[in-house]
Amino acid sequence: MKTSRWWQRFSIISFLLEVWLPAWIMAQTTPPTQGTTSPKPQNERLQFRLVGYPRKHNEGRVEVFYKGEWGTICDDDFSLSNANVLCRQLGFVSATGWTHSAKYGKGQGKIWLDNVQCNGGEKSIDLCKSRGWGNSDCTHDEDAGVVCKDERLPGFVDSNIIDVQVDEDRVEEVRLRSVVPTKKMPVTEGVVEIKYKDGWAQICDVGWTPTNTRVICGMLGFPHERKVNKNFYKLNTERQKHRYRLHSVACVGTEVHLAACPLETNKGNATESCEGGMPAVVSCVPGPQYVQNNGLKKKKLKTTSTVRLKGGAKLGEGRVEVLKNNEWGTVCDDRWTLLSASVVCRELGFGSAKEALTGARMGEGMGPIHMNEVQCLGTEKSMWNCGFKNITSEDCQHVEDAAVRCNTPYMALENSIRLTGGRTRYEGRVEVLSTEANGTRSWGLICGGAWGTKEAMVACRQLGLGYANNGLQETWYWDSSNVTEMVMSGVKCTGSEMSLSHCQHHRTVSCQKTAAKFSAGVICSETASDLVLNAPLVQQSVYIEDRPLHMLYCAAEENCLSKSAASANWPYGHRRLLRFSSQIHNIGRADFRPKAGRHSWVWHACHGHYHSMDIFTHYDLLSSNGTKVAEGHKASFCLEDTECHEGISKRYECANFGEQGITVGCWDLYRHDIDCQWIDITDIKPGNYILQIVINPNFEVAESDFTNNAMKCNCKYDGHRIWLHNCHMGDAFSEEAERKFEKYPGQLNNQIS
């Protein structure tokens, strides 16, 4: 019996091996037909992460956690569409690029996917065509990476490992549809609609509450809501057919997105009726930045003067800074959440927060850190009403500065500008939409004559492409468009405008050079540098030196002395010099590099060095009424990393004709004892003055923030000695403290009263 049973089992096993084994071998050696998908097993949760080195938080090698193991994706057939799907799964709005050949280093373990081909609209990478899970002929030399746009999708936590569960019912996009035709932007009132399949659906308003309206307005970039005339909309909506997708919405009011509220979804074709109700309608109050002749009382729209955002590319994003004891300081990111970030956003006249950013993602601040462990409920009028801890030096460093990205109203500003001819979407010749006398609209060029960095900043902001890297006055190398007519000239921006149309410009076009090759262009960037001066060091290092003329020949050649030096009895006599050290920090998110390449640097034989920028800093001594009484300037004879924060490596060194620049997190030190590190005060009478130092004064190199480039000190000179007091960056004090500073009479001795 035992032998018979054994033989039966052996026969069955042999049969199965004959049928199954060849099929299994074929499956391992032959790629599946292109166009097939290998869906993951039901209830299998995928996790994604970005890893590798060197990288920023929004880029890296893509790794997938599947069947209990992390693995990579092969770069065969990889595309930007694949990257878009992966970036959205990682919680970013889209991809800006992708990498091949293990740019971020080689992974280990499984290569989970190969020959991935997405259309770009898939909810998950496993819905794209591929060879199937675990089926690959690649090595880890071919690991794919992605570069995601540094902007989070609503509702995603700021974590590197994203636990993904595809939800077809997830509410992502919401809009207000005005029932009255209007060209005014933004739209502040209308029917609430959510994106559904290829169209838009409505929400049944039965049980609708003001807290629901508050959430909708916050999502759409508005800080407040107001009552709406439902009778007007009832008459209007009764004549229309509706697709009701959501009902029973029950928001608390502190949610940052409708998807976070309890709600019910209509299944099927979403055409169910809304018995006893109508489509939900809301009316929102815009912040003062967006009020344009729409009859709203501005006195009700005043925003705070004790909180501000710094370092962001767009309106409504930046490092959070608060005013305490008349001095601005940052907020530590411990326990920093969307609830606290939303309070900041609404306080500043924006909507709820899209992202609560940690780890100095909008650059590091300088000076004090005023708050730590901020904990808001989400209903507070101001962040100062939230719970928080006062800071101690052991608690936080500026690498932990908190930042926000706020929801802002849609203004459609990007529809009236475009770039053409560039190699990427971040560069090109600027073309703007203009309206002709007969009412027709067409694209035209901007005269490049007066175009510079500040104008480029506004253009890049309007396009939603981040910061300006360069503003170009000639664009002959981007000549790929048939648009040749100049429609704007004399454009002059402060750099803070939302649109080029908000900048000053000629009423009638007037260009010296009308050929298309002389039209304006830009190069935009997701990141930018930000230089600030160490103000306390200037105050600590100041002194007067009487330097003999025979030691100043090189300095005179570089125009580092006042004009009266030309008539001095060389080499006899001396010049009186106000000397100090300058320590210039890069607190931005990109390295500061000279605009000119090394091929165009100028060699200065007397000092034996190259000048990479004609003027890097201005040193001025001002009278109490602001008149310049003495000046100096510093050419960037050597932009290099003198020192860096812990964990950051130096990149730039001037020796041996090396590359020049200042790395993020590093600083360049100009010691008090080097040539031209002074102001020639030989002709200055004793008195009270203001010492002003301005970095990058001609805006030659783009930065994320120019408001912190100036430093001021009160100065007392008695003819023999000099004292500095109240040295601070130009934007470090409150307006009240700045006014007091400008009226400061100077001290009578070196004891500050």
Image (cartoon, rainbow, N blue to C red):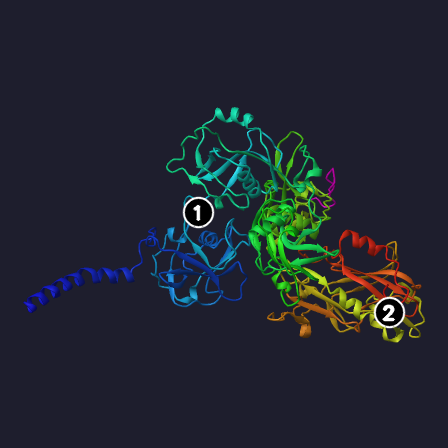
Q: Residue at x 69, y 38 (%)?
A: 300
What's the amino acid at mark 1?
Gly
Q: CA distance from mark 2 to mark 1?
A: 66 Å
Residue 324: numbered disc = none
Categorize mark 2 by other alpha carbons within 10 Å: few (<14), some (14-19), many (20+). some
Q: Judging from the image, what secondary structure is the residue with disc 1 in?
A: loop
In the rendered image, the residue lying farthest to the left is 1
| Left or right: residue 56 compared with residue 658 | left
Main secondary structure found in the magenta portion: loop
Report x, y in % for residue 148: 52, 55
Residue 550: quarter of image: bottom right
Residue 121: numbered disc = 1
Q: Is residue 226 visible?
A: yes
| Left or right: residue 128 compared with residue 147 | left
In the image, residue 466 sits, relative to residue 682, either above or below, namely above
Question: Dividing the image into 4 quarters, which one contains the C terminus?
Answer: bottom right
Span shown in magenta: 504-514
In the image, residue 104 sits, relative to residue 524, either above or below, namely below
| Left or right: residue 733 compared with residue 203 | right
Q: Is residue 313 visible?
A: no
| Viewer-proximal residue among 512 and 318 | 318
Report x, y in % for residue 113: 38, 59
Residue 683: quarter of image: bottom right
| Viewer-proximal residue among 312 and 618 | 312
Q: Which residue is mark 2?
A: 577
In the image, residue 129 sits, relative to residue 725, either above or below, namely above
Q: Residue at x 64, y 50 (%)?
A: 385
Q: Is residue 180 magenta?
A: no
Q: Is residue 513 magenta?
A: yes
What's the amino acid at mark 2?
Leu
Question: Dividing the image into 4 quarters, which one contains the N terminus?
Answer: bottom left
Report x, y in % for residue 622: 86, 58
